[in-house]
Image (cartoon, rainbow, N blue to C red):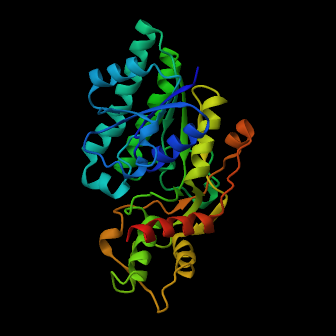
Amino acid sequence: MKIKSFVTGVNGFVGSHLAEYLLSKDEEVSGIKRWRSPMDNIDHIKEKLFLYDCDLLEPANLREVLLTIRPDYIYHLAAQSYVPYSFENPTQTLEVNGVGTMNLLEAVRELKATEGIDPVIHICASSEVYGQVKKEETPITENQPFRPQSPYGASKVIEDVLGSMYHRIYGLKTFVTRSFTHSGPRRGDKFFISAFAKQIAEIEAGKMEPIVYVGNLDSVRTIMDVRDTVKAYWLLAHDREFGEAYNIGGERTATIKQVLAILLTLSTYKGEIQVKVRQTLLRPKDVTLQIPDCSKLNNRIGWKPEIMLEKTLLDTLDFWRERV
């Protein structure tokens, strides 16, 4: 029988890439989406998926879906994931990410007791749990104290803690990942690499003036490709220590300004493209230094990122060129 994998947020950026990867492993892939959510990211594979309309804030519906699927693996990716939006709507961010995760874990806890459903559960937290670190605290290990700098970061702390707690108290087969910056095709245009790529594609198409609008360009990020990220998720799901958390990050460290410079060199626009700061793109409180120590992950599964930053940027730019 095929392995049954269940992905929350399957039609999202990371969820769609993970679904593709799981299908390549000949797994049966199910996922939940909200009825009004766009399906563009999975249009090319949706006929191969088992899709359910379900909201993480509706526990009864969630239990019904899990009982129907009886998954072997759960990849919990669904979240309100845009940091600036979390400052505007902190309550919604905490509900979706925190309460939604608790509803999922509670559903599995109940179904384990009554129906024998006992899947491996991947809780996707975030590097944002660490918040702003000092230079001497880098590279960041899993033992770094949590100091979130946004409601989004705080909500991911809740997910992270719930994941380990439900293993300790109820014996659920959970593990947590804290992914650092990852990008690639299908990334929403609110996130910096995709936002830059979309603007450049629109400039090339003559749809906007030759100006790229930016926020803080001085932040330092270690960047990986989403396609490398989902491989790490799958490898960990099949070889991990339950109740543990793992950093996942790339090996290429750069300022956001340097990333933009590479994207501009990939542009086909013949004139000069200016760069201007837009105040609305600046966060109330920014995280400016994110360099991970991924030795725990690498020692566990032998994972290393394979896709070069330049390919990630070019593929993202080509993604937007096709759409504008």
The C terminus, quarter of image: bottom left
Tell which residue pokes out farthest to the bottom in this image: 271
Q: Position of residue 131 (x, y in %)?
A: 47, 52
Q: Position of residue 190 (x, y in %)?
A: 37, 62
Q: Position of residue 224 (x, y in %)?
A: 59, 57
The N terminus, quarter of image: top right
Q: Nearer the viewer, residue 21 or 277?
A: 21
The part of the image, by quadrant, that contains residue 238 is top right
The part of the image, by quadrant, that contains residue 313 is bottom right
Tell which residue pokes out farthest to the front in this image: 47
The part of the image, by quadrant, that contains residue 93 is top left
Res. 143 in view: no
Q: Position of residue 208 (x, y in %)?
A: 33, 82
Q: Nearer the viewer, residue 211 or 30?
A: 30
Q: Residue at x 63, y 46 (%)?
A: 141
Q: Residue at x 43, y 22 (%)?
A: 69
Res. 30 in view: yes
Q: Residue at x 33, y 62 (%)?
A: 284
Q: Residue at x 50, y 65 (%)?
A: 316
Left or right side of 231 for 272: left
Q: Nearer the viewer, residue 79 or 95?
A: 79
Tell which residue pokes out farthest to the top in this image: 114
Left or right side of 219 for 88: left
In this figure, what is the number of numbered marks?
A: 0
> Relative to 313, does residue 103 appear above or below in the rendering?
above
